[in-house]
Image (cartoon, rainbow, N blue to C red):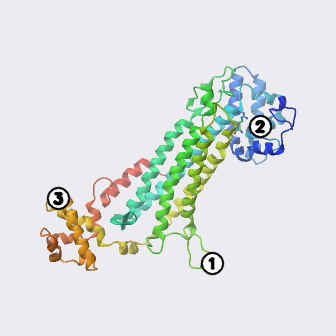
């Protein structure tokens, strides 16, 4: 079988060179986008008078047949099929004869592949968005369900202040919400039709590109043919988006790994999302989260890899651009699996309120004591210092803060009164923080309400 571009060549391609050049192994997944693009292109050629009605019809019927073969897993690749575009055109011509060769009039694989990739990504981004929303909904549902639970909040991984378990869950909702809007924004830049840009200089066929865009469901038409065939910004943006989403999921994973560690034991993970050890019978490992954390390294690598591929390219299409697909597809596949796995793990976790309570210690209420002094008119900077001394006293006595009686507190500062002892209450501490975004029940409920409104009605 000769190459579709073989006319000017007399020698054979070295088999290893052919292997290097071949992208069908990974771009076969563009088959549907490629056929849709070709169907629309056929109609555009017919409308421009380049194909007769019969020719256009023959090509469309042939493309439907090729479509069915792919859809039914009945498309047989040939060794010479270099990429998805050549494979489909080769098969079309086998099915309908030489008229199939008219399909590529006025078109190049350069504008074709860019079109395919964008069409594919529009679909893939919709699917990723659905997975993302499902995870957000899981976080919201759990936050609502466990709103009573109070646990230690950490900064520097040191016990800091008590927080609602829900607040922790919801912190990830908002990260993912930014990912969601980021995806919507970058989707607008995917939604641009390059077809009609030809190899680099546009097409001599007087096609109506606006109508072509509408037929394919694109919102815009590319404005410069040279930019259209070289632009992979949308791939880089998608990879950045994936990497940052990965970073969010990786940070969530790190917390989950810590919280499910028996030494903290705030949550246990369902068997469905953990694995055992082949050696230590007692082990239950949080692999779902370790793998998510690990795969985030790949996602970051895909972004940096593509940027490195792009940085030195001269204008327009260069074969280096074929390297855009593997990282892109791998990033999509990775997220398509980790998002639902994390959703499942979140929905099936069991919190342990007793362990959360046991990990709360009075030192996490030191700020509340300082705030109490502020209520007595003492400037915060001074009250912070006073409570620092109280903390030191407790450490010296090897006791906890509430073990210090009023007279001991008063020995540090006379402003202490018996009402100050009311601060030794974790629920009270949390309820003090009732401004928008705070950890008080009402503030968290308000947050859940706003989050639900953003998410819209469930399925
Ligand atoms: N397989 C190629 C790619 O993925 C398609 C475009 C080939 N264009 C060319 N001029 N050889 O980029």
The residue singled out by tag 2 in the image is 86
Q: Nearer the viewer, mark 1 or mark 2?
A: 1
Asked if disc 1 is less than 8 Å from ligand 1, the answer is: no
Q: Is residue 81 left or right of residue 176?
A: right
Task: Return the disc, 3 or 1, that comes first in the chain's sequence.
Answer: 1
Residues at discs 1 and 2 in contact (Cβ within 8 Å)? no
**Residue 424 pos. (x, y %):** 25, 71
- Residue 457 visible in the current orientation: no
For marks 3 and 1, give the CA distance: 58 Å
The residue singled out by tag 3 in the image is 379
**Residue 434 pos. (x, y %):** 27, 57
6 versus 180 height, above or below: above
Q: Is residue 254 left or right of residue 322?
A: left
19 versus 318 height, above or below: below
For marks 2 and 3, give the CA distance: 76 Å
Q: Residue at x 56, y 44 (%)?
A: 238
Residues at discs 3 and 1 in contact (Cβ within 8 Å)? no
Secondary structure at numbered mark 1: loop
44 versus 148 height, above or below: above
Q: Is residue 32 left or right of residue 137?
A: right
Task: Return the disc, 2 or 3, that comes first in the chain's sequence.
Answer: 2
Viewer-proximal residue among 26 and 459: 26
Disc assigned to residue 364:
none
For marks 1 and 2, give the CA distance: 51 Å
Secondary structure at numbered mark 3: loop
Q: Residue at x 47, y 60 (%)?
A: 252
**Residue 98 pos. (x, y %):** 84, 29
The residue singled out by tag 1 in the image is 279
């Amino acid at each position: 079988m000769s190459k579709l571009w073989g006319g000017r060549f007399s020698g054979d391609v070295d088999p290893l060179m052919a292997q290097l050049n071949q992208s069908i192994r990974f771009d076969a997944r563009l088959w549907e986008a490629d056929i849709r693009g070709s169907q629309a292109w056929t109609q555009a050629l017919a409308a421009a008078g380049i194909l007769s009605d019969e020719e256009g019809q023959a090509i469309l019927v042939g493309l439907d047949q090729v479509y069915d073969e792919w859809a039914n897993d009945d498309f047989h690749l040939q060794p010479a099929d270099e990429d998805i575009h050549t494979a489909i055109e080769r098969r079309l011509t086998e099915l309908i004869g030489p008229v199939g060769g008219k399909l590529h009039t006025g078109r190049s694989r350069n504008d074709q592949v860019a079109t395919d990739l964008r069409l594919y990504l529009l679909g893939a981004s919709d699917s990723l968005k659905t997975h993302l929303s499902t995870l957000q909904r899981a976080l919201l549902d759990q936050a609502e369900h466990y709103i009573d639970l109070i646990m230690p909040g950490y900064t520097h991984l040191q016990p800091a202040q008590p927080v609602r378990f829900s607040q922790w869950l919801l912190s990830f909702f908002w990260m993912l919400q930014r990912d969601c809007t980021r995806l919507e924004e970058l989707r607008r830049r995917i939604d641009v039709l390059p077809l009609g840009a030809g190899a680099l200089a546009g097409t001599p066929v007087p096609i109506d590109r606006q109508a072509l865009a509408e037929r394919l469901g694109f919102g815009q038409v590319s404005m410069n043919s040279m930019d259209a065939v070289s632009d992979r910004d949308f791939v880089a943006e998608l990879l950045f988006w994936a990497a940052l989403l990965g970073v969010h999921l990786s940070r969530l994973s790190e917390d989950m790994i810590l919280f499910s560690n028996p030494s903290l034991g705030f949550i246990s993970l369902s068997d469905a999302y953990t694995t055992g050890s082949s050696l230590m019978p007692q082990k239950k490992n949080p692999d779902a989260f370790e793998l998510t954390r690990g795969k985030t390294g790949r996602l970051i690598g895909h972004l940096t890899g593509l940027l490195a591929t792009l940085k030195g390219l001269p204008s327009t299409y260069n074969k280096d651009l074929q390297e855009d697909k593997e990282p892109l597809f791998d990033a999509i596949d990775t997220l398509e699996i980790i998002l639902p796995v994390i959703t499942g793990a979140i929905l099936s976790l069991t919190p342990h309120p007793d362990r959360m309570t046991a990990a709360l210690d009075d030192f996490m209420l030191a700020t509340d004591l300082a705030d109490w002094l502020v209520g007595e008119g003492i400037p915060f900077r001074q009250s912070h210092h006073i409570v620092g001394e109280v903390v030191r006293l407790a450490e010296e006595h090897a006791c906890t803060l509430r073990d210090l009686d009023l007279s001991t507190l008063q020995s540090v500062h006379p402003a202490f009164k018996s009402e100050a002892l009311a601060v030794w209450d974790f629920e009270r501490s949390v309820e003090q923080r009732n401004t928008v975004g705070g950890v008080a029940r009402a503030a968290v409920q308000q947050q859940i309400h706003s989050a639900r409104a953003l998410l819209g009605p469930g399925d």
